[in-house]
Image (cartoon, grey):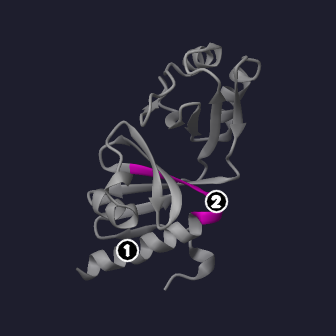
Amino acid sequence: MVEPSDWRAPIEAAGLAVRMGEGMQAATLRYFEPGGAFAAAVREATGAALPQPLEAAQSADGQLTLAWRSPTETLALAPSAERLAQLEARLANVPDGCLVNLSGGLEVLRVTGEGIVDLLCRLGGTGSIPRVGEARRSRMADVPVLAVSLTAGETLLVVDRAYAEHLMGWIRETLLDFEGA
């Protein structure tokens, strides 16, 4: 039994590993026009275009993940506060868009292993499963989650911090079912 204070503890079961994305930083890029000055500045700063609907991509240096959230919003994930601050500084004075740091409000869960599809099906259904290069918003464990896949065998689950413990609990219980099968 996991103590409530240990809900962040890694989970390894049924050929899957789930770990909190410690140190991951998140920001939303909001813009009026996906082809405007802000989009051009993002491309210049990252070496990557704003993603198209349901797409996810990495920056040219591999340090930033850009994931589509809506027609005028992209989520940026960075491995450190320094990397996110660099992007923020580059975009600070660009018209028609802004970067809003969400690092304190989001958690990133890193799911690895061969059973990701089965786990995500149980948590949210087939519509919640991103293909490589996709970002899909759906409900998992009855909370909103953005699932991002950039490589085979790994999916990032981005969830509001308030729901992270709940989602980890559901994952833990679901994986117990996998082992019992």
User: In this orientation, which residue lies closer to the viewer: 61 or 173?
Assistant: 173
Can residue 9 be seen in this snapshot? no
- Please, what is the three-letter code of the amino acid marked with disc 1? Thr
Q: Helix, strand or loop at disc 2?
A: helix
The disc label shown at residue 141, or none: none
- Dot 2, how many residues are within 10 Å of its Cα: few (below 14), some (14-19), or many (20+)? some
The disc label shown at residue 161, or none: 2
Query: Residue 85 sits in which quadrant?
Result: top right
* Residue shown at the point (35%, 79%) measured from the top left: 176
139 magenta-colored: no
161 magenta-colored: yes
- Please, what is the three-letter code of the amino acid marked with disc 2? Arg
* Residue shown at the point (73%, 24%) measured from the top left: 89
Name the quadrant of the C terminus.
Answer: bottom left
* Residue shown at the point (68%, 53%) measured from the top left: 105
Q: Is residue 8 left or right of residue 95?
A: left
Q: Where in the figure is residue 83, as x and y percent of width and height? A: 63, 33
Q: Helix, strand or loop at disc 1?
A: helix
Q: Where in the figure is residue 42, as x and y percent of width and height? A: 59, 21
Q: Main secondary structure of the magenta part?
A: strand
Q: Is residue 53 left or right of residue 120?
A: right
Write down the residue under mark 1: 174
* Residues rendered magenta in the picture: 155-163
Up the image or down, 105 lies above or below 39; here it is below
Query: Residue 98 sits in which quadrant?
Result: top right
Q: CA distance from mark 1 to mark 2?
A: 20 Å
Can residue 154 be seen in this snapshot? yes
* Residue farthest to the right, as pictured: 93
Query: Residue 111 sits in which quadrant?
Result: bottom left
* Residue shown at the point (64%, 26%) measured from the top left: 31
Q: Where in the figure is residue 2, as x and y percent of width and height? A: 52, 81
